Amino acid sequence: MRAEHHPAHPRPLPALAAALLLILLAGSVTQAAQPQALIVFAAASLTDAFLAIETRFEAAHPDTDVIYNFAGSSTLAAQILQGAPADVFASANPHQMDAARAGGQIAGEPQIFAYNRLALITPADNPAGIESLRDLATPGVRLVIAGLGVPARAYTDAMFSRLASAPTYGRDYWAAVRANVVSEEENVRQVLLKVLLGEADAGIVYRSDVTPGNTDRLRALPIPRLINARAQYPIAITAGSAQPERAAQFIDYVLSEPGQTILAAWSLIPVRSLDGAAGS
Amino acid sequence: MIHIFTRARRQSLHDPQPLRVSFGQVIVGLAGVIGLLFLLLPVAVLAIEGVRAQGWLNAPASGVPQAITLSVATTFVTSALTILFGTPLAYLLARWRFPFKRLINLLIELPIVLPPAVAGLALLETFGRRGAFGPALETVGVNLPFTTAAVVLAQTFVSAPFFIRSAQVGFQNVARHIEDAARVDGAAGWVLFRHITLPLASRALVAGLVLSWARALGEFGATILFAGSLQGRTQTMPLLIYNVLERDLDAAIWTGLLLIIMAVIALAVASWLRQTDEPAE
């Protein structure tokens, strides 16, 4: 293509390019002028509870727009360590919080704001006839669990090793269960999805993953407290937060009675007793 | 960056008016360089990081060898299936006339632009246990999700269009008079295809195959939904990268580096085959 140099003829292409650059620049400027956004990195298992908290918190703080990044806690910790812009980090596991802290990305002391427990779920029609944890060892059961590095996996492993050390279950039990694992998912929500779709016969998720929205398609079997895990959820302000006061407001709300009530409504265990309800 | 600039200068010497660099040209040049850097820089940084971190040292512990074996094996089967069913389809599209051909041509490319998660969901809804054909498959003892076969299906679904499109163009470019000449000499049917059409279109076929293989190798979204992730069974290299990202960044980067090298080789082979193909036109 030859460029003809007639000054009288405007060249549309460079003008277009210049306009595009201007638009890009203008876009970045207007974005920087929105300090109201509060970015919260939260564990996938907190999705429903935190979305409910957002509505209430924003009603109480109209100048704040809470924006969530939900993912596995390990992914979130990795993102924060790589410098992702977050104001608050709510992890499903102290380990991931410690990792972010060791990397100098957490300001102040993390606070435990909730507990969670594991649940064994099957599709509503229970195709493999799972009635207890013992049935997970039946050959041919398609079990889906969280992948290595995901907090839920650590709790799952701990639960099974506790079972395996019980004489009625034994080492063979754990080996048989492991042989039935058909997929190790990236986070608990993916485990939930595979069971909801009916592709998996059973899955180990958090109790809080069984919500009013999916109980009609799921069966949740209780796991005895003695062998169940108690997951601790720490929350903290990130070191890189440009608005620590706003972040502190959010954390305070999560720890407040209304915040804790919402968490309890979504099957998380609150850290403060609510009207006599047990705290753990 | 300096290299790119001198390159651009040298090219502008061939221009009729080399000394009059207009404002517009500067803008276009600058935008082009920014575009180029944006495309190349991340890959270059990843490569440097991979070499610097020496991720291969603890790669075996992270299941990298199993992932490589699985990726190589599944993409091999995927390529075989693509040739087996893609070649006849490409030939039909290139030579036969039938209703709705345009529409079919368009739909075949859909998997290329489909978001991978949608592709995975579509496969689940079709071949999953609760899918359209799930119960029928189950009666003959086939259960696809979470199996290596599911990995192959996901890869084939998203990558075969690359081969089919290239092969179709290849068949279309075979000069009809050469085939007619062969027909005069008595060749027909399979013999004609095998000894005349196929060799003449072979470059386009191989180029398409290499591209589709590279796409299959990088398949992630459809696989993780349809096949899940399990070491040695369904965890291919891209899935492994995603899985070890938080635990072992070095191993993830190193695996990524391997994939980049394979992809570059595939692209180079495809582009070389296409280039040597051009004079024939």
Image (cartoon, coloured by chain):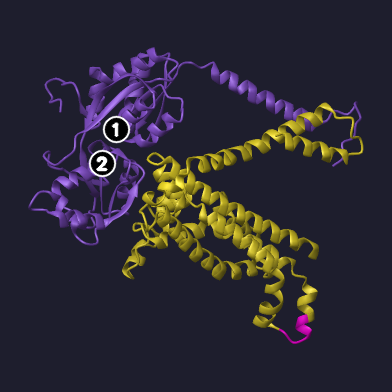
How many discs appear?
2
Q: Disc 1: which chain?
A: A
Secondary element type, mark 1? helix
User: In screen coordinates, is A139 left or right of B141?
Assistant: left
Task: Output the letter for the chain in purple.
Answer: A
- Amino acid, disc 2: Ala
Q: Which residues are magenta?
A: B182-187
Mark 2: which secondary structure? helix
- Name which of mark 2 and mark 1 comes first in the sequence: 1
Where is the C terminus of chain A found, in terms of image quarters?
top left
**Residue B154, percent across and down?**
46, 57
Above/below status of A150 relative to B180 = above
Residues under numbered marks 2 and 1 in contact, where contact means CB atoms less than 8 Å apart: yes
Relative height, residue B204 to residue A2 (above, below): below
Residue at which label 2 appears = A154
- Relative to A154, is A20 on the left or the right? right
Q: Quadrant of residue A188?
A: top left
Chain letter, colour yellow in render? B
Output the chain of dot 2: A
Residue at horizontal 58%, vertical 53%?
B263
Q: Residue A53 in magenta?
A: no
